[in-house]
Image: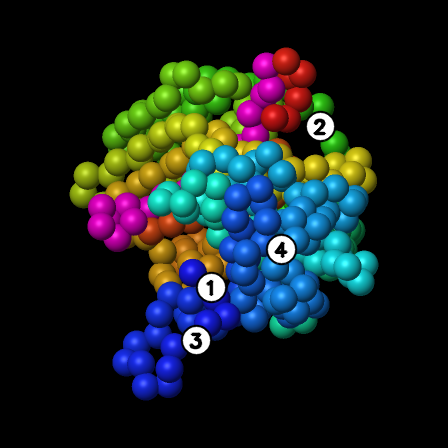
Amino acid sequence: MVFGKWRAASAPTPDAAEMIAALPNAVLLIGPDHVVVDANNAAENLFNQSRSAMIGRHSGELLRTAEGGALMAEDLSEATPVAAYDIDLMRQDHRILRVDLMATPMPDRPGWMLICLHNRSAPYLSVSGNRRRSNSRTAVGAAAMLAHEIKNPLSGIRGAAQLIQGDGDETNASMTRLICNEVDRITALIDRMEGFTDTRAFTPSPVNIHAVLGHAIELAQHGFGARVEFKEVYDPSLPDVLGDHDMLVQVILNLIKNAAEALEHTPHPQITLTTAYRTGVMVADRRNGREKRRSLPIEVCVIDNGPGVAEDIADHLFEPFVSTRTDRPGGLGLALVDKLVRDLGGMIEYVRDTEREQTVFRMLLPRVDAKSRKFA
């Protein structure tokens, strides 16, 4: 299997080597002992090296992190696929590339694997990497300032309306009640916005995720989830999550509330919460100015049998002010969930299971290392 060999022009269909050679993402074929056996055209562009210059070199020479170490030398030798996101690689010309990496072993060829790299620092990406984090910090600062400046005059407006309401005029009373109600509604919206402005660091501690799920279900059953049937499918052998109990409760409650609202018109509403241990997903951890790679093996899913969301907003669910509800717009719940999950060092995604007609919100979280009690 060599990417560079092309079939004759008269061939009816392209073979696998031709298709891999034409892929827009960089692909490396790694042989035993982590030696580069072949590379496609996109890999030549990504690493700014010719195919012949890469062949025969140790993969660690190409996959150098920004700190100078070889990328996941031990992880890439495992027999299971590995995914790593937001990894900073240093090219031979010292340019830093941010990539998502997928390493897939070849079952019929022990010691061989395919490595696919998606360049997240490409020019066509409008917001990514450091720029995205910079924009996020700017947005947080603007939101904090805006919330503070708006709430001050709102309290004055409400106080003035209450004074007018007490003059005994029924017309004035009706209008001032309307003013007070609208002021309270805007204040509640701003209170929710302020959830995005809390950038204080928290001290992580071991948390039993099943205790968090049980507590969230109990709260939901006494309120917005009273008509919903809850199912729990857990892996009892899961290790603790290293995070924050209150933040995790808030995340799960928001997801359950979102699911319950989606089930409003479903005849037999059902929410299923599942936990499992998954391997092969890693993200870059840039805490304290140093980059490390952290696995996210703890999977938590909140699944409902509702209709799902419209396709035109599915890719924007976690953005502020994007909402599936037309009767009560707001769209801050899932955006806050996304922020809290990222603060906890994890990631969250939305998937529509069309075969089972289910909506799935899937979280991946770091586990506690039994020895160090730190992020594994």
The residue under label 3 is which amino acid type? Trp
The residue under label 1 is which amino acid type? Val
Residue at figure coordinates x 18%, y 43% from the top left: 267
Residue tagged 1: 2
Residue tagged 3: 6
C-alpha span from label 4 to label 1: 13 Å
Within-10-Å neighbours for mark 4: few <14, some 14–19, many 20+: some
Front residue of this view, candidates 105 and 365: 105
* Residue 105 % position (x, y): 45, 44
Residue tagged 2: 202
Q: Report if residue 264 lies within the magenta region.
A: no
The residue under label 4 is which amino acid type? Gly
Mark 2 or mark 4: whose residue is earlier in sequence: 4
Front residue of this view, candidates 310 and 123: 123
Residue at figure coordinates x 48%, y 22% from the top left: 209
Mark 4 or mark 1: whose residue is earlier in sequence: 1
Mark 2 or mark 3: whose residue is earlier in sequence: 3
Residue at figure coordinates x 54%, y 60% from the top left: 38
Mark 4 or mark 3: whose residue is earlier in sequence: 3
Left or right placement of residue 149 versus residue 248 in this view: right
Dot 2: what SS?
loop
Dot 4: what SS?
loop
C-alpha span from label 2 to label 1: 50 Å
Within-10-Å neighbours for mark 2: few <14, some 14–19, many 20+: few
Residue 76 shows in this picture: yes
Residue at figure coordinates x 70%, y 43% from the top left: 70
Q: Count the marks.
A: 4
Q: Nearer the viewer, mark 2 or mark 3?
A: 3
Residue tagged 4: 56
Q: Which residues are magenta?
A: 353-370
- 56 relative to 16, above or below: above
* Residue 215 % position (x, y): 44, 20
